[in-house]
Image: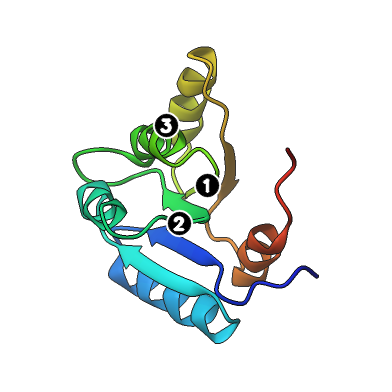
Amino acid sequence: MPSVEGCRVLIVDDERIVSDTLTHIFRSHGYEVRSAVSAEQAIELLSEWVPEVAILDVSLPEMNGVELAILLATQCPQCRLLLFSGRPESEQLVNDAANGGKFFEIVAKPVHPSVLLDWAAQKPIH
């Protein structure tokens, strides 16, 4: 497994229990983690901290996770993005983004944290 020590991970989920739990799990595995409960809060973090990996809930208040992923892909092109959702309609948002030329991986909630840790530890393909 690649070294993850200090790898910067952004977790965005409006369910605080989910974002807090994932933050704790990732930190306990050596990641530097920031979490946000909204896309707007995540955007504020970007002014001072740039993630290498972002795990985003699709269903967020105001700006959704797909819109945030599009913004992150533009502002932080080296950031690897993973979307997750417990709602079937989220798939349509991801498909709409793909039709616009923005392709994102999405996994269904509930997802075991080990799946997210394994995904985050993968080396990017360039």
The residue that disc 2 covers is 51
Q: Relative to 100, is 81 above or below?
A: below
- Amino acid found under the numbered disc labelled 1: Cys
Amino acid type for the residue under numbered disc 2: Pro
Residue 89, numbered circle:
none
Dot 3 falls on a residue whose secondary structure is: helix
Place of residue 101 in the rendered image (x, y in percent of width and height, measured from the top left): 53, 16
Q: Residue furthest top?
A: 99
Element type where label 1 sits in the image = loop
Element under disc 2: loop
**Number of residues whose C-alpha sits closer than 10 Å to that of mark 2, classed few (under 14), some (14–19) or many (20 or more):** many
Residues under numbered marks 2 and 1 in contact, where contact means CB atoms less than 8 Å apart: yes
Say whether disc 2 or disc 1 marks the residue closer to the N-terminus.
2
Q: CA distance from mark 2 to mark 1?
A: 6 Å
Confirm or deny contact between disc 2 and disc 3 (CB under 8 A): no
Mark 1 neighbour density, 10 Å: few (under 14) some (14–19) many (20 or more): many
Which is nearer the eye, 2 or 87?
A: 2
Residue that carries the numbered disc 1 in the rendered image: 79
Nearest to the observer: residue 26 or residue 2? 2
**What is the spatial separation of the Cα atoms under label 2 and label 3, in whole angstroms?**
13 Å
The quadrant of the rendering that contains the N terminus is bottom right
Q: Nearer the viewer, residue 124 or 54?
A: 124
Residue at the extreme bottom? 28
Image vertical order of residue 56 relative to residue 115, above or below: above
Distance from Cα at disc 3 to Cα at disc 1: 10 Å
Residue 20 placed where, x, y %? 36, 76
Q: Earlier in the sequence, mark 3 or mark 1?
A: 3
Residue 11 position, x and y percent, is 42, 61
Query: Within the image, what quadrant is residue 64 found in?
Result: top left
Horizontal side of 63 relative to 34 (left or right) equals left
- The residue tagged 3 is 74
